[in-house]
């Protein structure tokens, strides 16, 4: 799925469902961070008109997702907790190139975003297929579709705006790195846990 090297064990969905308040809080902040990341890319790369336009739409959509999640939290009698540390995303960020050319750092930042979208999409798919709560299952199915589109947008911009990066080759390196990394996850009630 989306080139991912390792798929999540469906039992992770049961762990998530058994601690819904916790996964919803973590999920809400994932959406906020996705919006912030899109805004950061806009701020640092204003010269790419189509990127500014499409990432503005993504930032808005991610905040709409945030709003949907906090509505669910409220409906179900939970409270939004503080942001949870996302160790998985921290490890991906370390993998992103920062010391090469400006274009290399830009392209890797787009691939970093595409990678998180791809895995989030896969995790939402696992939730949609395995949780017992039908309403939440439908909710996660819709989000899965949305994040798959974001993944495509980020990857396509990387291909469009590369100057000195072989994007196909670098994307394979990302997929290999993430495939190893994700082996240590899948046991906690976090979106990337
Ligand atoms: Fe989202
Ligand atoms: Fe997204």
Image: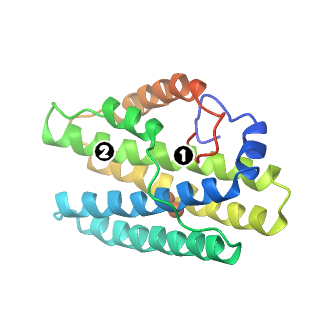
- Name the residue: 68% across, 77% down: 75
Observer-nearest residue: 5 or 9? Answer: 9
The residue tagged with tag 1: helix, strand or loop? Answer: helix
Q: Position of residue 122 (x, y in %)?
A: 64, 46
Eyeballing the image, is 67 above or below 174? below
Q: Quadrant of the C terminus?
A: top right
Residue 159: x and y in percent read 35, 46
Q: Is residue 126 left or right of residue 108?
A: right
Q: Earlier in the sequence, mark 2 or mark 1?
A: 2
Q: Which mark is residue 109?
A: 2
Query: Quick one: quadrant of the N terminus?
Result: top right
User: Please, what secondary structure does the residue beneath circle 2 have?
Assistant: helix
Is 192 placed left or right of 114 in the picture?
A: right
Sort mark 2 into few (<14), some (14-19) or many (20+) by Cα contacts within 10 Å: many
Q: Is residue 45 visible to the viewer in this orientation of the structure?
A: no
Give the colour scheme shown: rainbow
Q: CA distance from mark 2 to mark 1?
A: 14 Å
The quarter holding residue 42 reads bottom left
Q: Quadrant of residue 186?
A: top right
Q: Where is residue 170 shown, x and y percent of the image?
A: 37, 30
Report the residue at 52% width, 75% height from top. Answer: 67
Q: Is residue 35 visible?
A: yes
Of 84 and 169, which appears nearest the observer? 84
Left-right relation of 7 to 120 = right
> Residue 91 placed where, x, y %?
39, 32
How many residues crowd mark 1 within 10 Å: few (<14), some (14–19), many (20+)? many
Q: Is mark 2 within 8 Å of ligand 2?
A: no
The residue tagged 1 is: 118
Above or below for 154 versus 47: above
């Amino acid at each position: 799925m989306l080139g991912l090297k390792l798929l999540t064990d469906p039992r992770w969905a049961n762990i998530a469902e058994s601690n819904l308040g916790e996964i919803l809080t973590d999920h809400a902040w994932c959406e906020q961070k996705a919006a912030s990341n899109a805004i950061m890319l806009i701020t640092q790369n204003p010269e790419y008109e189509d990127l500014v336009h499409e990432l503005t739409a993504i930032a808005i959509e991610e905040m709409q997702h945030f709003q949907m999640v906090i509505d669910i939290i409220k409906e179900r009698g939970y409270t939004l907790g503080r942001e949870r540390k996302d160790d998985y995303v921290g490890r991906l960020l370390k993998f992103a190139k920062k010391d090469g050319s400006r274009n290399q750092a830009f392209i890797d930042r787009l691939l970093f975003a595409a990678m998180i979208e791809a895995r989030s999409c896969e995790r939402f798919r696992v939730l949609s297929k395995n949780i017992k709560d039908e309403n939440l299952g439908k909710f996660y199915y819709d989000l899965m579709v949305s994040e798959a589109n974001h993944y495509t947008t980020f990857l396509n911009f990387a291909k469009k705006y590369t100057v000195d990066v072989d994007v196909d080759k670098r994307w394979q390196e990302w997929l290999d790195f993430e495939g190893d990394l994700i082996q240590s996850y899948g046991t906690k009630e976090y979106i990337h846990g």
